[in-house]
DNA sequence: GCATCTGTACTATTGATATAATACAATAAT
DNA sequence: ATTATTGTATTATATCAATAGTACAGATGC
């Protein structure tokens, strides 16, 4: 699973979002031990410092916590994860509808376009 | 109409996208004369060089063209604008569905969530 | 005990972005 | 004709992101 980083946004943010998604989608389970900073950095083909920054940021959100010498772990707060999932989904929806609106598509237009897209992908 | 720039991505890109949207949504009509680089920079509260870079990039896409001393104009190629609108819409849809999928929502889930969101906003 | 692994901290360097301050040539406006 | 406006180009500076390299303290595994 490649990390698919692009150069348009700070890499540490993309790392954050990627790990956040893995937590929220269940790829990482609550309480799971994360690979070490160094291993994650190798896996993402990124400098350890950059990965360190991403993980520190995730710690500020409460999604992971670190134990000084034994490693980093996913939070056990299941409701935090659930709420974050719902919040992110809402943010994506509103941002998406806003973008489409900026292109001149009404909400009804947008809904129709999505349905067409999904039909064509079966 | 504030330009609503954030610090998470290069400003010149955000300027590009904003102007591109104004062209595609019809706020700027084909053949319209754009304000000067300097005026646009003032309006966006941005350095003239940054605005210049954004406009140069838009020129590479063919959305605007410049006449050395009389100013910059929106392309007259209506079909180019139309195609770009459709392309951007598709890109937004696919990217959005991808993001929702990464959060663990199926296409059906996503469609349902959007409909709920729209219901709640009437 | 000793080597290894952990997170963390620090310095230095490079490249990109944004800004500031000019400058110039060609046209438009007066 | 003169002035103002246009896009464009240049140089310099400051900041941030990313990288490289190194170091240290506290556990863990043997």
Image (cartoon, coloured by chain):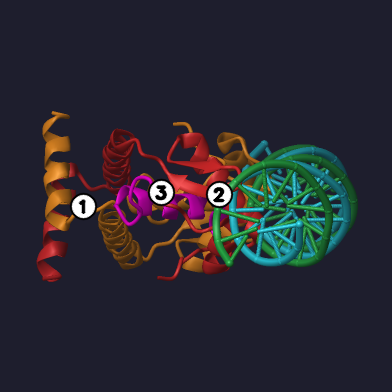
Chain colours: A orange, B red, C green, D cyan
A18 is within the stretch colored magenta: no
- Earlier in the chain: of badge 2 and badge 3, it is 3
Q: CA distance from mark 3 to mark 1?
A: 15 Å
State the image coordinates of residue A99 (x, y, percent, origin top left).
31, 54
- Foreground tag (3 vs 1): 3
| Quarter of the view holding residue B37 | bottom right
Q: Secondary structure at mark 2?
A: loop
The mark found on residue A105 in the picture is 1
Question: For the residues carrying marks 2 and 3, which lies nearer the camera in this image?
Answer: 2
Where residue A61 appears, as percent x and y from the top left, is 47, 66
Do residues under tags 2 and 3 come within 8 Å of each other at their CB atoms? no
B74 sits left or right of D21 in the view:
left
Task: Give, as a single range, the part of the protein colored magenta.
Answer: B8-32
Mark 1–mark 2 distance (CA, rounded to whole Å): 33 Å
Residue D23 vs B40, above or below: the answer is: above
The residue depicted at 34 percent of the width and 63 percent of the height is: A84
Residue underneath mark 2:
B70
Whether residue A81 can be seen here = yes
Neighbourhood count class around disc 2 (C-alpha, 10 Å): few under 14, some 14–19, many 20 upward: few
On the image, the x and y values in percent for residue A17 come to 45, 52
Instruction: Determine the secondary structure under disc 1.
Output: loop
Viewer-proximal residue among B67 and A46? B67
Q: Is residue A30 left or right of residue B53?
A: left
Q: Nearer the viewer, residue A65 or B104?
A: B104
Per the image, the residue denoted by label 3 is B20
Left or right side of D1 for B5: left
**Quick one: label 3, few (<14), some, or many (20+) residues within 10 Å?**
many
Specify the quadrant that holds the N terminus of chain B.
bottom left
């Amino acid at each position: 699973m490649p990390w698919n980083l692009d150069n348009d946004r700070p890499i540490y943010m993309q790392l954050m979002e990627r790990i956040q998604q893995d937590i929220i989608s269940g790829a990482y389970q609550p309480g799971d031990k994360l690979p070490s900073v160094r291993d994650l950095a190798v896996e993402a083909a990124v400098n350890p410092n950059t990965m360190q920054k991403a993980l520190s940021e995730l710690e500020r959100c409460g999604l992971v916590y670190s134990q000084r010498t034994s490693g980093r772990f996913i939070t056990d707060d299941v409701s935090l994860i659930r709420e974050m999932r719902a919040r992110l989904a809402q943010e994506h929806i509103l941002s998406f509808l806003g973008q489409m609106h900026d292109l001149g598509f009404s909400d009804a237009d947008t809904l129709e376009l999505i349905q067409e897209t999904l039909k064509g992908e079966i």
